[in-house]
Image: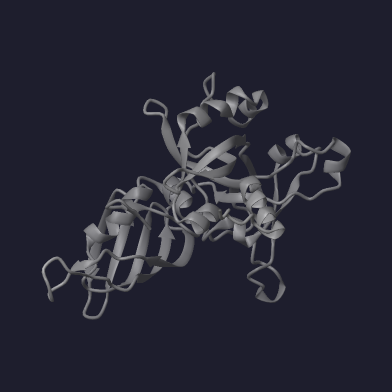
Amino acid sequence: MAFPSMPHGQEVAQVLAEASEEFLGMVKSYNARRGFGFIACEATAAKFGRDVYIAKAEAQLVFASDPGAAAAVADRQQPPSLAEEDLVRFRVRLSAEGFPQAEQIRAVRRLQGTLLVAPGDGAMGDAAADGRVVSDDLAAVHGGVREAIVPRAACGQTQLSAGDKVTFCVLDAGQADAAARRTQTPEALLVMRVPPKQSNLGCVLGCCTLILPRPPVSGTLQVGAVAGRPDLELHCHALGDRVILSGLPRDADQAELMRFFAKHGATAASVANSDLLSFAAIAFPGPAEVCRFIARSLHTFADDKETR
């Protein structure tokens, strides 16, 4: 009789490490009545290729099993429950179908502060230089420490300047005693710009290159055949309550763009054609949705039962 071979010690260690790995993300959606939702997280999107599912049973445990978690949503009607844009720490287990599901979800407090130095403002134009943020909210939870480091990678594609108001979170602020916390400089994570006022909607919130998968088109060689197309590579400028795209091919239309942008809060798309390339304007309800969109460098979206 043959028995399956046991995994080597290194493989066992890797499996255990992955099972205990903790992630940080934002609740993308949660419907308390229907009892499920999803977490957006760049690390899990890169690892699993999709958003992380929240089951109702796990969501109900967030505040029931951790009385201190209510402090993260102190301004919310009691008893608290998960809601869109909540920041959370979580671990992942795979469903029977191999899809990521969140477990051991913990709420993380969102803090607000002002940038003293914007990330990327280092000497000699060092784009990777860390920034710094000052925050009274941080001092209240981190033993009086008022400043945190702001890594460029924590800001997604947001363009920031000194003086900008931002929201962010820090980890493990409550696990060390006050004396230890005063000697530590925390690191700001999930940094997002506070939306500009209506009177300043012309300011640039971010610039980046957007790589967007295209849907296949019906082939002409045989019935039912489909042909893949190269991804769109678009120049993206976020301005107030809209995103401007350049570099569109002439066969890209509003419907194709809204396949993606509608799932991230956009309300409309308009395309203008030129002799060589086309341009598009993607409208959002307001600057808050644009700030949330550019705060991440990696997005997923489901289309025709496929997640991209």
The residue located at (62%, 47%) in the rendering is 19
Image label count:
0
Decide which of 236, 72 is in the foreground and name it: 72
Which residue is most to the bottom? 276
User: Is 265 situated left or right of 12 in this image?
Assistant: left
Q: What is the quadrant of the C terminus in the image?
A: bottom left
**Colour treatment of the image:** one colour
Relative placement, left or right, of 55 versus 306 is: right
Residue farthest right in this picture: 179
Q: Is residue 65 above or below residue 285?
A: above
Report x, y in % for residue 60: 52, 26
Rendered location of residue 239, percent (x, y): 42, 58
Of residues 135 and 2, the one nearer the viewer is 2
Question: Which residue is outermost to the top?
Answer: 78
116 relative position to 97: left or right: right
Answer whether residue 58 is visible to the viewer in this image.
Answer: yes
| Residue nearer the viewer, 299 or 85 | 299
Name the residue at 63% across, 52% down.
15
Horizontal arrangement in the rendering, residue 307 relative to residue 170 (left or right): left
Residue 75 visible in the snapshot: no
User: For residue 229, which quarter of the picture?
Assistant: bottom left
* Res 127 → quadrant: bottom right
Q: Nearer the viewer, residue 58 or 41?
A: 58
Locate residue 103, reporting x and y percent.
Answer: 56, 37
Q: Position of residue 253 (x, y in %)?
A: 22, 64
